[in-house]
Amino acid sequence: MFLAAYVIDQIWLCSYPVRLAGARFEARMTVIRLGSGQILVHSPCHITAAIAEEITRLGPVAHIIAPGNFHHLHLTTAQAAFPCAKTWICPGVEKRSGSLQYDGVLGDMAPEDWMGQIDQVLLQGTLMREIAMLHRASRTLILVDLIENFTDATPRV
């Protein structure tokens, strides 16, 4: 089992390893069930057949999101696993991966597909951009790079 329930029947997490600029650490994919029963995959990990099967059991995958400029690396595996899903990106991702196919660029206003269920805002720093999301029903704030706290005690760092 790859997914761990975070909010029962609404949000699941899957940790995955990342290597960036010589550093090793973990990131998390977040899987959200929308009110329609459709699934939103946020910051996808490398999607294997086993992970795709586990996600698909939750519901039909309708959306794949690259929520920050460093969270596009596994989009193509998610797109291959869920070819009917729309792909949404954070502004700037299109510059990092020129061949990436996507359906929309996210900003401060949520697309109609999850408006009223997930609020979002574009955060822009000097080096990073990120779409911060708030899952209203569970009051869960979903971030990727805004808050980092690596120490010697951090697992797999």
Image (tube, helix red, strand yellow):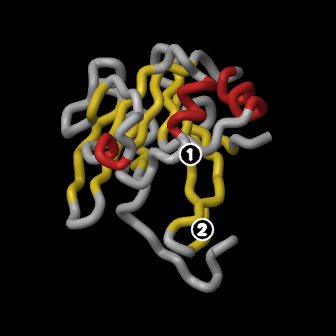
Residue 110: tell me if it is visible: yes
- Measuring from the top left, give residue 122's x and y in whole percent: 23, 47
Neighbourhood count class around disc 1 (C-alpha, 10 Å): few under 14, some 14–19, many 20 upward: many
- Measuring from the top left, give residue 130's x and y in whole percent: 31, 51
Neighbourhood count class around disc 2 (C-alpha, 10 Å): few under 14, some 14–19, many 20 upward: some
In this figure, which residue is indicated by the disc labeled 2? 25
Q: Residue at x 56, y 82 (%)?
A: 151
Instruction: State which quadrant residue 154 falls in.
Output: bottom right
As shown in the figure, which amino acid type bears the numbered disc 2? Phe
Mark in the foreground, 2 or 1: 2
Q: Is residue 118 left or right of residue 48?
A: left
In this figure, which residue is indicated by the disc labeled 1? 29
Element at label 1: strand
Q: Is residue 65 left or right of residue 92?
A: right
Are circles 2 and 1 on residues that touch, CB within 8 Å?
no
Assign the N terminus to one quadrant of the image. Answer: top right
Along the line of sight, the residue nearer the viewer: 93 or 97: 97
- Measuring from the top left, give residue 6's x and y in whole percent: 60, 45
